[in-house]
Image: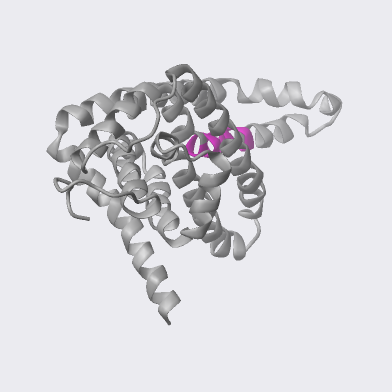
Amino acid sequence: MIRVRSALRDLVAGCGCLFRGLAWVMAHRRWWLFGLLPALISLLLHAAAIVWLLFNAVDVAAWLTPFADDWGWRDAFRRILAFLLVAGGVGLSVFTYTAVTLAIGEPFYEKLSEKVEEDLGGLPETADQPFWRTFFRSIRDSAVILGYMLMFTVPLFLLGFVPVIGQTVIPVIAALVEGFFLTAELTTVSMERRGILRKERFALLRGRMPAALGFGVPVFLASMLPLVNVILMPAIVAGATMLVRLHLAREPRSAGAIAA
């Protein structure tokens, strides 16, 4: 019973950090606009890729299936494959949007996260590392996390076509998996600031799974709504910083810190 209550508290705390992040950017609208730029650039890149795929999907399907040149139903087969390519591209864009946005906006979100930490009582007392080292390590970690995501999401995407479970059980599992990995991705900046590297981050998140899911699942669900993930991205980064500082990697805070 105690474990259930603790899990529920962590779940509520994780979800609450997302709303606290939203409240923070509403109170600091200049920082919201500052954090919006990388999200818009990422949106344009993804939109351009999807538009290109829409106009070239049939040609790509033909290039992928030279063995079907002599089939009598070749055109119908390739149109079906083209439709699946577009659907897969749209689905993939949902999963990669956050990773690409964070990679593009690394300097932006680092500054935004620092500002949140300062408002919560100050930056942690850790040794500063050269920007180039943390930047390239962050890119590498994002690629690793994206690889993990694809390892799970591709089979889940295919299982989504299975009758009954594909419309009930699989979407729930997908939301939980994506929510966890999104939290892992979004907390990278704050964890790195504390010297917590990727393996330690995953261990920490697994140990506080309800908090990780409480934050990540709503973020994943919001990302399914067009443009919502763009508008919310600065708030999501702010909320992820609060999640790390207040619940995942707590440290002593100054007297001027905002109460949790």
Question: In this rendering, is residue 84 above or below 246?
Answer: above
Q: Image quarter for residue 44?
A: top left
The residue shown at (42%, 41%) is 187
The residue shown at (16%, 27%) is 30
24 or 85: which is nearer to us? 24
Q: Position of residue 51 (x, y in %)?
A: 49, 23
Q: Position of residue 147 (x, y in %)?
A: 62, 37
Q: Is residue 252 left or right of residue 214?
A: left
Q: Position of residue 21 (x, y in %)?
A: 25, 44
Q: Position of residue 9 (x, y in %)?
A: 34, 67
Q: Image quarter for residue 15?
A: bottom left
Q: Is residue 61 left or right of residue 23?
A: right
Q: Is residue 90 magenta?
A: yes
Q: Which residues are magenta?
A: 84-95
Q: Is residue 44 left or right of residue 18?
A: right
Q: Magenta stretch: dominant SS?
A: helix
Q: Is residue 27 magenta?
A: no
